[in-house]
Amino acid sequence: MNRDTTTSPAADWGQLLWDPLRLSAMATEYAVDAWQRSILYADVRRQRGNQYLEHLQEQTPNVLDFASEVIMSGLDLPQPVNYGLVRILPPADAPADPKKRPFVVVDPRAGHGPGIGGFKPDSEVGAALKAGHPCYFVGFLPDPVPGQTVEDVMRAEAAFVRRVGELHPGSRGKPAVIGNCQAGWQILMAAAVWPELFGPIIVAGAPLSYWAGDNPMRYAGGLTGGSWLTALTSDLGAGRFDGAWLVQNFENLDPANTLWSKQYNLYAKVDTEGPRHLQFEKYWGGHVFLNDVEIQYIVDNLFIGNKLSTAQLVTSDGVRIDLRNIRSPILVFCSYGDNITPPPQALGWITDLYRNDLDVLGHDQTIVYATHDSIGHLGIFVSGSVGRKEHQEFAENIDIIDVLPAGIHHMQIDEHPDPVQEGDPTSDVFLTRIRRSSIDEVREIVRPDPENDRRFAAVARISEVNLACYRSFVQPWMRALVTDQGAKWLEQLHPLRMGYELWSDRHPLAAAVHEAAQHVRDHRQPVSEANPFLQLQAQFSTAVEQMLDQFRDCRDQIYAQAFDTLYSLPLVQAMTGQSLHDDAPPRAHPSETPEHRQYLVQELTRLEGAVHSGGLVEAAIRALFFVLAERGEADERHFRHAEELVRPQLGNDFDMQAFRHLVRRQALLMRLHEDAAVSAIPGLLNNVAPDDIRQVAGMIAQVLGSGDALSAPEQAKLKQVSTLFEQAIRRAQAASAPAMPSAHDAPSAVADTKPKTSSPKPKAPQKTTASKTPAAPQTRQTRRGKST
């Protein structure tokens, strides 16, 4: 029985006190229910312990809820890693469409085991399968390969994506890759080094700019003196870092949920909550390990050093990891309810890398961001509502995301204005709108603070000094004293592991509790929702949660004030190489180098020369962007309708990558040289038949009419475009009309064709007719973006 005591009518304690018999009966009823719930709660927790022990014995422990088959093992690579690639087997009644691009879901290795991206049917994996895409999953084993590094994992992930692309040569585009949390920044690092392998990249809840925002976790490095503690923890693990410490850091962020709410929710709804609780605990208790070199790299270069978002990382073979090298669209999905990766940390890399919108356009990079108002960090991956809405819309609109023009865009998913048709599987519940955003809009979310950066730069320098001291004077002793068996004992004594292992069937009282729970289920006597003691229980729980929340807020405020006070001291900043009178930023902005400025000038000059290059398709795309420029947005109805109209014209040899390049290039031209690009439309149609021009003009009107009604300025622009197309039609008709022979030319023509007077004359109209409809090869070249 699932009770919601928050909506129950309030008890009238005044009347109850005057009716002791009724009060006694209610107290007895509540006492019996509370006792039974206690037994059932203990039994579910016993099952939790059993599940944990069974999970440890699995060869490849995971929580993936879909059937799969192994495609590649990272252990077989030249630089072996503990990662692997599996193919998700679609249901027999819903096979994948081989023409659709494959999806690759990469799970985070941040303390927990793999499977969270396919934890339930309404998940990232489930959304990709429902949309008809082939789907793959990248997971990992609990123990890393000795000597495995972050760079080795990057190479493995690139090899997996390359393999998926090879398995689907006939798909519409390159593989779309989803990176959750830690996997998000690692996938972007791989895509920056091997950009040719990746299609659209979705990073969900992934921290990329670690000094941004105001979440308390970012102060941990400074308040503990840097990353020396990470090195000590790895040494205590005999060269392995226990992921349970990362999980404990997550739990410390919300003591109310960790210490009370999670357990109370199971106790209060124990009749129905058991299966969900066990499912989540299987994931939450699946702790994994990292090599010492892996976690040290992550903490030094990302968490404390914050070097990824300013292109300061370099691979072992000298390749700079610059996120601006990524040629695929990047979709960032984050939530304001996420206390681990809030939007400033998810989006701060944009303001770290780019000064203005022109800088983004100059790198031909497409960035899309979508935000959720309230969902927590784990909810981004496991929430059923998020899976049915955001992840489903991402999967269904992935081709639209792929052809978006360069720049920053904001994606918003709303309820569909059209009513859902019952029994129609194609009827959409949600409508995706994509509008043009800007670097200034992102900056309002991130709120960069130079003084804050100076404090964190001081932390990074102090961390380097403390780590060097630890490695010089302490680490040799620790490595000599710690043995493999001692490290194993310390792992088993971790508080999180002990919570699972102490209460299972191994406990001498477990059998008695299990037997009592069976008896309780057979004779369950749930209390009435109107019982005043049940309402008092709920009120007490709320009070405990509020108390722990107040403790958390006070603790976080103390952390923030201590951090700001300590690292704002002029002496501390001077000791870390920062002068009070130095106005230079603590991190050099990567877009201010002379090489980059020269690159921008060359790109913009080359783009300006393409204004008069193109044909029929280029003209149509310019017209669409010109009319919708005032609105600054389009919804999926425009894209769907445009695809339905254009696809028959493109033929069976449609090249998604060529079409993507064409659309993005024309959009960039319209963004930077709108007047010149629009004025050049008639010239682009010089060698096109009148019927083709007229047909495309009608298609443009249909596409623009498929969404919301056009405003008055948009209607005026549509009229202007129609006039340009009419001019091109009249010019094409004049050019294709047969020329009248003059008196001077007639004798010559007759003389030249005297032996065969009858054959040339009837063929002349056929040539004229043929010129109105270009030959097939010419049409395909024009539609692929080549000049006619």
Image: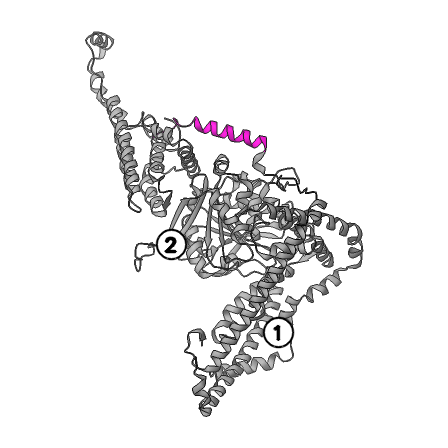
Q: Residue at x 65, y 79 (%)?
A: 508
Q: Is residue 197 magenta?
A: no
Q: Amino acid at mark 2?
A: Asp
Q: CA distance from mark 1 to mark 2?
A: 46 Å
Tell me: 712 left or right of 297: left
Looking at the image, what colour scheme do you see?
A: one colour
Quickly name the residue at label 2. Answer: 414
Residue 504 got which mark?
Answer: 1
The local secondary structure at tag 2 comes to strand
Q: Height in image: 431 above or below 311?
A: below
Q: Is residue 2 visible?
A: no
Q: Amino acid at mark 1?
A: Ser
| Residue 773, image quadrant | top left
Q: Are marks 1 and 2 in contact (CB under 8 Å)?
A: no
| Residue 687, image quadrant | top left
Q: Main secondary structure of the magenta part?
A: helix
Tell me: 475 left or right of 36: right
Q: Is residue 593 visible?
A: yes
Q: Which residues are magenta?
A: 593-615
Q: Nearer the viewer, residue 209 or 275?
A: 209
Q: Nearer the viewer, residue 295 or 163?
A: 295
Q: Position of residue 110 (x, y in %)?
A: 60, 56
Q: Quadrant of the C terminus?
A: top left
Q: Badge 1: how crowded within 10 Å, few (<14), some, or many (20+)?
A: many
Q: Residue at x 52, y 39 (%)?
A: 355
Q: Nearer the viewer, residue 245 or 428?
A: 245
Q: Position of residue 105 (x, y in %)?
A: 51, 52
